[in-house]
Amino acid sequence: MKFLHLSDLHIGKSVNGFSMLEEQRHVFRQIIGYIQTEHPDAAVIAGDIYDRAVPGIEAVRVFDDFITELVNEEITIMIIAGNHDSPERLSYASRLLADKKLFISGAFDGNIRKVVLSDNFGDVTFWLLPFIKPFSVRGLFNEREIETYDDALAAVIETAVVDYSARNVLVSHQFYTKSGVLPIRSESEINPIGGLDAININIAEKFDYVALGHLHGSQRIGADHIRYAGSPLKYSFSEIRQEKSVTLVELNKKGNFLVSDLPLTPLHDMREIKGELEKLVNDEKSALADKEDYLRVILTDEEEIIDPMGKIRSVYPNVMALDFENPRTNSDVSAINLDSERISALSSYELFSEFFLEMRGFVMSEEQEALIKELLETGCRNEAP
C-alpha cells in the first residue's frame, strides 16, 4: 500500500503582503507529477487546507483545480480539517464526493471516520481525525473527565475500537510531542502559550503509521512511523533552512514499511542576505542567485541611507523584510530597556531616539542628535515660567 502524505497547504496564504497562490499552484503540479511517476494508491492531506476559515475566491479555485486533478488520477483521497480550516465548509458535499473516492473529515461528531483500502497483504484502515479541542469533545463523552488535549485524544482513540493486529494509519492534525524530544516549530504556526495544546504521542504509537499535520517542518516525532509531512512551501523566515517535500509511505506486511521524502521546488526560494547596500546590489553579488527570491535583507551600513527599501527593491523586487545591523544600532538597542517599569525614567531625548530607531531602522547621525538636543533644550526654555 503506497500513499502520499502531505499537510499544511495553507492555500490563499500571504507572507509579508506577498500572495503565495502562484507558488502553491507550482508545487501542486509537482505533487501531481509524483502521483503519475510513483503510482500511489492514495493521497492523505492532514489538515490546514486553507489559511483561514473563510478562504478567498481565488484560494477556493486553486484548491478546486488541485483536488480535481487528484481525482482524475483515480486514487483515493483522504482529507481532514486543521485548526485553520472551517470544518463545515471543508466537508460540504462530502457524502456525494465519497463516490469519487474523495473522503473528507471536517467537524468531529464523536466517531473517527475510517476508510478501508486493500492490497496483497490485506486491509489497511485509515482513521481520519480532524483537529479537535477539549471543549468540543467534552460534550460527546459525558462519562469521562476531559480537561486537556491529552484527555480529549485519549477518549477519542480509546472509543474507536482499533484492531491493532491489522494495519492502521492515523491521520491527525494536532501538536504531538514525545518526552525528551523537542519538535521543530515555525513562526508561521499558531503557537498557544505554554504549549497547552501539546499531546503525548504515546496515545498513537500503536498505529502502523501516524500521518500528522500542524507543524511546518518535515520531521519524525519519537519514532520513524510517526511523522509530520510539513508544509509544501516556506511560509516564514524561520523556515528558510528547511527542505520542503511530500512524504511517500509504503506499507507492506504488518510491521514493515518504507518512508521517503520527495523534494518540492518553489518558483522562488525564501532566503536571507546580509551586507552593505552597495555590495548587495552590485551585479556580481546579485547574480549569485535568483533576484526574484523572497528575501529578508539585513543592511550593515553605518551611514544613513535614503529610501533603503526602494534601492534594494530596484534589484530584488520581492524583498519581504528589511532590517539593519551595525555597531551603532546594536549599541543603542542594548543600552536602553523600554520595559514598562523604566520607560517613565527615560529622558525626552532617549524616548525620541528610540522612536527614531523604530521608525527609520537606524540611529541618528551626530548632526541629527545635536539638532534634536538643541530643539528639546529650546522647547524646555520656552516652557519655563
Image (spheres, rainbow, N blue to C red):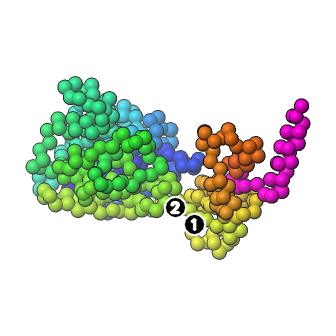
Residue 367 covered by magenta stretch: yes
The numbered dot on residue 290 is 1
The numbered dot on residue 269 is 2
Q: Position of residue 110 (x, y in %)?
A: 24, 31
Number of residue marks: 2
Residue at the spot 58% in from the left edge and 59% down from the top edge: 295
Q: Position of residue 241 (x, y in %)?
A: 46, 62
* Vertical side of 269 occupied by 146: above or below: above
Task: Specify whether 306 is left or right of 6.
Answer: right
Residue 7 covered by magenta stretch: no
Q: Position of residue 300 (x, y in %)?
A: 66, 64
Residue at the spot 65% in from the left edge and 75% down from the top edge: 284
Is any atom of residue 327 visible in this view? yes
Who is closer to the viewer here, 178 or 337?
A: 337
**Amino acid type of the residue tagged 1 in the rendering:** Asp
Q: Secondary structure at mark 2?
A: loop
Q: Secondary structure at mark 1?
A: loop
Prevailing secondary structure of the magenta residues: helix
The answer to whether the residues at label 2 and label 1 have Cβ atoms under 8 Å apart is yes
Q: Position of residue 181 (x, y in %)?
A: 31, 55
* Vertical side of 115 occupied by 331: above or below: below
Q: Residue furthest left?
A: 165
Who is closer to the viewer here, 104 or 33?
A: 104
Is any atom of residue 42 visible in this view? no
Q: Which residues are magenta?
A: 360-385
Quarter of the picture holding the N terminus: bottom left
Who is closer to the viewer here, 277 or 3?
A: 277
The residue carrying pointer 2 sits among few (fewer than 14), some (14 to 19) or many (20 or more) residues within 10 Å by Cα, namely some
Task: Specify whether 170 is left or right of 289.
Answer: left
Residue at the spot 29% in from the left edge and 32% down from the top edge: 147
* Mark with earlier residue (2, 1): 2
